[in-house]
Image (spheres, rainbow, N blue to C red):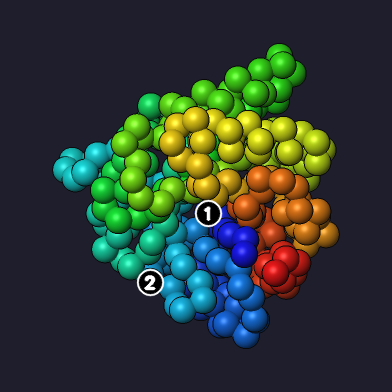
Amino acid sequence: MKIIAGNWKMNGTRFDLDKMLSDLSSISTNNRIILCVPYTMLCGGNGSVSIGAQDISTHTHGAFTGEVSAQMVADTGAKYVIVGHSECRQYHGDTNDTVRQKAALAISNGLTPIICVGETMAEKQAGKTMSIIESGVRESIPSDVKSDIIVAYEPRWAIGAGLTPTADEIASAHTLIANTLADMGLAGTPVLYGASVKGSNALEIMSIPNVDGVLVGGASLKSDDFIPIITSVK
Ligand code: 13P
């Protein structure tokens, strides 16, 4: 069983989500399917697909125009929320500290956070990939986690660029994350890989040790692209 999560980013309408849910209901899979959609489309999903948001506020409520709290996301019936996505780190100033606060709020409101870590191109070129990943994991996860969380490794330089790290690079990153999680008392936490996943590389990526699933951007928008990823693994 793998976790196949889609991140629709700022794409789609409720019509598109209805169509995707209907298309996905016709496939047979043991994998856990999650769709992280814009706030306007949040809902309870259905028996085969769970729904998640893509970000939440660091605040619980109050005068924060435009922000959406963990409690509000949970109120829609959604079960997951991505925190610390590279685009939120890049465009909205998320740091490991704010990501940890968001993850804690997600957990206390009954949501499972999908906590993203990953290195930029500049960090990769400076030879800092491993230290950025390890500090991302250690600093973005709240210290007293007792319920389920998911971690996603997203090499920031590869997202949306059609680039993928080598299988060895993915294996090294995921082994480091698994070992770090074990050291934090969180052994067994699922670790997803995300960046340029498509039908043609999904099986190879999900066969790498310590890769428990994928977080898919562009190729999760259309069922013709998403279904082959879901059905590539049992
Ligand atoms: P792409 O699959 O489009 O590279 O996006 C990955 C991503 O950001 C998933 O969260």
Task: Classify residue 92 by image quadrant.
Answer: top left
Task: Identify the residue at horizontal 48%, vertical 60% (top origin).
Answer: 37
Point out the image quarter for the C terminus.
Answer: bottom right
Task: Identify the residue at horizontal 54%, vertical 31% (top origin).
Answer: 180
Task: Identify the residue at horizontal 16%, vertical 43% (top origin).
Answer: 62
Which type of secondary structure does the marked residue at label 2 adopt?
Answer: loop
**Labels 2 and 1: the sequence-earlier one:** 1
- Residue 139 appears in the figure: yes
Return the x and y of residue 206 as percentages of the image width and height. Answer: 72, 54
Q: Mark 2 is on which residue type?
A: Gly
Point out the image quarter for the N terminus.
Answer: bottom right
Return the x and y of residue 69 as percentages of the image width and height. Answer: 28, 49
Disc number at residue 44? Answer: 2
Examine the rendered structure and indicate whether residue 168 appears above or below residue 114: above
Judge depth for marks 2 and 1 and give the one in front: 2
Q: Mark 1 is on which residue type?
A: Met
Return the x and y of residue 42 as percentages of the image width and height. Answer: 39, 65
Examine the rendered structure and indicate whether residue 229 appears above or below residue 139: below
Q: Is residue 204 left or right of residue 89?
A: right
Indicate if the residue with disc 1 has its beta carbon within 8 Å of ligand 1: no
Task: Identify the residue at horizontal 26%, vertical 48% (top origin).
Answer: 108
Where is mark 1, residue-wise?
A: 10
**Residue sitting at the far left:** 62
Return the x and y of residue 100 as percentages of the image width and height. Answer: 37, 34
Q: Is residue 56 left or right of residue 95?
A: left
Q: How many marks?
A: 2
